[in-house]
């Protein structure tokens, strides 16, 4: 199985980066311009950095200062395994281009970097989708919340004077909190029952995606009453609970069941205002083996077999929680590039087999590529 996984990762990397069979190398050019997104006006006098990614290592390949027309240009040595991207810092926020590849057929590439003014106001922040996924473990309920966040304004949200941007509200008693596969620290700061992000939020739809997971104590005889609310407007929230003999009630709208090898109950809520709460109630003991199955889901990078087929339109939820970073085992190391490449390969296979619609596929693939780029950057910095 490990051999197959490695082969899939290599094949996916070749597909992702467009690697061709022949060995070649050459000299090319990467150029472009930096402009203000709101007006299209050029930005003069900012430093653009050229990054190169080769052999799973990232390095700085050059710097250039934009001219009066906002233009920049680099000479770049390329080969079959190298990709590039450019970045610029504007008003304290870093913006990056898509991946760029040079070949003998196309030895030149162009990138337009759009930058934004900044704002400390969260008025345009909204949760486009909030997915709430439950598994039962021994003496605990294991929750993963997938947040897909949009910024509907024209400025990058940079937060308060302490640099805190997005806030994620945790339920009282939450333990073993993990965000994006790592405990709070660095980018994320926990203050009581609030988890703060410190990264800027640029304008756009679904520009930020995070998974917050945690444990809550669960006594089958006493049950658990859970109330959830959010700091921002919510367009849609989905609740998903495995059907394992536990009595579940929620004031969200019940949508029915999904699943083949394993059945899940699904509820949905829409148009929630900031602070507006919804609730779910659990009573009873999970069936024998249910906690064990939940534990397997927590440690399996691919998630339970057959979930992609079972959920159909809910594949975004399943991919986000199980495939991308998963309902995780506690203390696991952050995702490495090979695992992310595996996830991209599985995503491609699911799409080719007709298990995902194109919009969902494109969104999840973009998120996985973004995560891959973050891991490359982490490797360059030597840490999280």
Image (cartoon, rainbow, N blue to C red):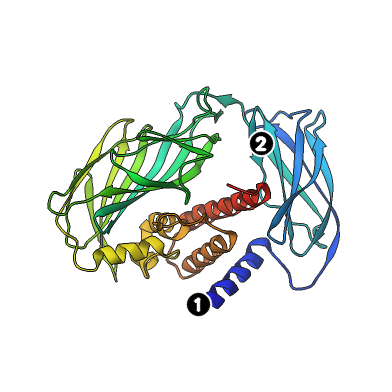
Q: Nearer the viewer, residue 269 or 7?
A: 7
Q: Which residue, given by chain and number where applicable, does mark 1 sit on?
A: 1
Front tag of 1 and 2: 1
Rendering coords of residue 312 (x, y %): 37, 62
Q: Is residue 249 above or below residue 341?
A: above
Residue at 86%, 60% (x, y): give it: 26
Q: Residue furthest left?
A: 221
- Asked where in the image residue 47 lies, by quadrant, the reply is top right
- Asked where in the image residue 37 lies, by quadrant, the reply is top right
Rendered image: mark on residue 272: none
Q: Nearer the viewer, residue 341 or 223?
A: 223
Instruction: Determine whether the residue tagged by mark 1 lies in a helix, strand or loop.
Output: loop
Q: Which residue, given by chain and number where applicable, does mark 2 sit on?
A: 114
Q: Nearer the viewer, residue 155 or 188?
A: 188
Rendering coords of residue 49 (x, y %): 75, 41
Instruction: Determine whether the residue tagged by mark 2 lies in a helix, strand or loop.
Output: strand
Please tell me which of labels 1 and 2 falls first in the chain: 1
What whole-number distance in Å separates the C-alpha atoms at marks 1 and 2?
Answer: 43 Å
Left or right? Give the position of 75 relative to 124: right
Left or right? Give the position of 302 relative to 370: left
- Asked where in the image residue 155 lies, by quadrant, the reply is top right
Q: Is residue 161 above or below residue 203?
A: above
Rendering coords of residue 309 (x, y %): 37, 67
């Amino acid at each position: 199985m490990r051999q197959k996984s490695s082969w899939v990762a290599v094949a996916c990397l070749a597909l992702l980066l467009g690697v061709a069979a022949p060995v070649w190398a050459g000299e090319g050019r990467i150029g472009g311009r930096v402009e203000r997104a709101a007006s299209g006006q050029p930005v003069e006098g900012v430093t653009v950095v050229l990054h190169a990614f080769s052999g799973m290592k990232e390095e700085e390949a050059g710097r250039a200062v934009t001219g009066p027309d906002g233009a920049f240009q680099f000479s770049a040595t390329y080969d079959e395994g190298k990709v590039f991207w450019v970045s610029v810092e504007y008003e304290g926020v870093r913006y990056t281009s898509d991946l760029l590849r040079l070949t003998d057929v196309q030895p030149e590439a162009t990138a337009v970097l759009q930058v934004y003014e900044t704002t400390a106001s969260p008025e345009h922040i909204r949760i486009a989708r909030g997915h709430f996924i439950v598994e039962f473990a021994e003496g605990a309920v294991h929750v993963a919340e997938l947040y897909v966040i949009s910024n509907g304004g024209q400025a990058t949200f940079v937060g308060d004077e302490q640099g805190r941007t997005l806030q994620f509200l945790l339920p009282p008693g939450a333990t073993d909190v993990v965000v994006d596969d790592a405990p709070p620290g660095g980018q994320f700061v926990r203050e009581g029952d609030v988890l703060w992000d410190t990264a800027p939020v640029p304008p756009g739809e679904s520009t930020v995606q995070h998974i917050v997971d945690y444990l809550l104590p669960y006594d089958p005889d006493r049950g658990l009453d859970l109330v959830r609310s959010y700091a921002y407007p919510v367009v849609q929230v989905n609740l998903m609970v495995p059907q394992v003999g536990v009595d579940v009630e929620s004031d969200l709208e019940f949508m029915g069941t999904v699943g083949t090898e394993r059945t899940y109950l699904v509820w949905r809520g829409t148009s929630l205002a900031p602070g507006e709460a919804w609730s779910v109630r659990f009573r009873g003991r999970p069936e024998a083996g249910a906690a064990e199955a939940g534990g397997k889901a927590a440690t399996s990078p691919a998630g339970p077999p057959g979930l992609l087929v079972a959920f159909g339109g809910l594949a975004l939820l399943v991919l986000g929680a199980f495939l991308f970073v998963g309902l995780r085992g506690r203390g696991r190391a952050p995702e490495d590039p090979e695992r992310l490449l595996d996830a991209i390969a599985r995503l491609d296979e699911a799409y080719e087999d007709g298990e995902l619609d194109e919009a969902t596929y494109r969104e999840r693939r973009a998120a996985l590529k973004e995560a891959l780029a973050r891991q490359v950057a982490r490797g360059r910095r030597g840490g999280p």
